[in-house]
Structure formats: C-alpha cells, structure tokens
Amino acid sequence: MRSTGSGLTLQQRIDARSVRTTKLFGSAQVQRFLDAARALITQRGSTDFTMHEVVDEAGQSLRSFYLLFDGKHELLLALYEEAIAKVAGQIREATGNDADPLNKLRTAVELLFEFCRPDPGAHRPLFTEFAPQLLMSDPIEIQVAHASLFELLADLVGAADVAGYLRAGTRPRRLAAMTLQTVMFVAQGARSDDGAHPITAAEVWNLCAFGALSTGVRR
C-alpha cells in the first residue's frame, strides 16, 4: 500500500487515504500485522520496535509485510488513523444525547484534550510520540490522518453557529481546524510553567471558547 502523493490537494489526499484505509483494514493479513504492532506497543508503552519483531509477533514473513506496507511509518500511520477514528466515535457517542450544541462542543473539546495528553497510566504513544513527530515531518499528512475527527468537530462548531453561540462572521470550519490543532498541541505539554499544576481540560475549553480578553475589550 503506497502512500498518497504529495502533489495532490488536501481533499484529494483525504479521499485517496479513505479508499486506501478501507482496503487496508479489510485485509485479514493486514489486521494480523496491526494486531502485532498494537501488542508490542501495549507491552512496551512506546512505538520503539522493529519490523522483524512485528513480523515475528504476527507469525508472518518480512516479504509479506513489505507487500502491504511501505515500512514502519505507514504501519504506525494506519494504527494512528484507527486510533483517531476510535476517538472520534467515542466523542460522537458522548455528545449524542445532549441537546445543547454548546455543551456538546465543550464535551468534545475536553474529551479530545484528555485523550491526547500524556498519561503514564494510559500508555498512548501513538498520540504522545508518533503524532508530534508526524506534525513536524509532514503537517499535511497529519491533517489527512485527522480528517474524521476534524469533520466531527466541524459539525459541532457548525451546530453551535446555527444556534447563535458564535460571533457574527465566524467561519465554523476554520474555527474547528484551529480548535483541533490548539487542543492537541496544548495536550502534548499539559503542565503549568512550574510543572506543579497541570493544565486542565476546563482551562483549554475556556481558552478555545472565550479567549483571554476581558468582556468588552475591543481591538
């Protein structure tokens, strides 16, 4: 499975990735490699493993691995996309029964923060190790990987806009993109300056929803 070309537009890359991912997760042999890599990540609490270890864990051959994946990066990318889709599903389920669009948006932002912040007891290296590396090496690739989560957040921001919660002239999809990036970035270093009082999900929501200026301040 070859990665999509960098010459494509963002939407073309998202569409191509969607087709590729559907085919990828539909293969039993691919699933064995994903399960093996996931098991190694769980055992070690990190993404520090070799392809030989994945192949041994899966009971497959190295040749069969490279017929399906370009290498470790694409394997981790597939696992990350799977994890993102699962997070999006959990957030959708958690917000499904709330009638207030603003409450739904707040729940989504706070849950996303909790999913992405480093947690020694949770062992989420795909979020704490792989995602920051991907953000630095290929910002467009991570936008493609986040497509399902972005669309969910865009829907929630759009609903809040329709309900009259957003300022006039706000562009909901752009606000959703900035909110997604802000929450995930802040979560990676979720601690205060002195390290004693970690940044909380509620603080991140207040920043995203209300900013830092006092009521009535104009610029």
Image (spheres, rainbow, N blue to C red):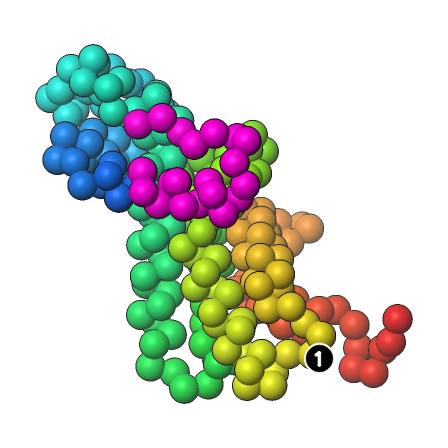
SS at mark 1 in the image: loop
Q: Is residue 210 left or right of residue 148?
A: right
Q: Residue at x 18, y 18 (%)?
A: 64
Q: Quadrant of residue 87?
A: bottom left
- Total tally of numbered discs in the picture: 1
Q: What's the amino acid at mark 1?
A: Ala
Provide residue 203's location: percent of width, then percent of height. 60, 67
Q: Residues within 10 Å of mark 1 (few under 14, many from 20)?
A: few
From the viewer's side, name the closer residue of 131 and 145. Answer: 145
Left or right, residue 150 beside residue 217: left
In what quadrant of the picture does the N terminus appear? top left
**Residue 25 appears at what percent x and percent y?**
22, 41
In front of the other: 46 or 176? 176
Q: Which residue corresponds to the image point at 71% horizontal and 74% vertical from the top-left?
A: 169
**Quarter of the image where the C terminus is located:** bottom right
**Residue that numbered label 1 is attached to:** 168
Would you place residue 149 above or below residue 68 in this image?
Answer: below
Q: Position of residue 183 (x, y in %)?
A: 56, 57
Q: Is residue 175 left or right of residue 11?
A: right
> Relative to residue 31, is residue 163 depicted above or below?
below
Figure check: 145 above or below 66: below
Does residue 163 appear in this view? yes
Residue at 38% across / 50% down in the picture? 84
Which residue: 15% across, 15% down? 61
Give the residues in magenta.
Answer: 1-20
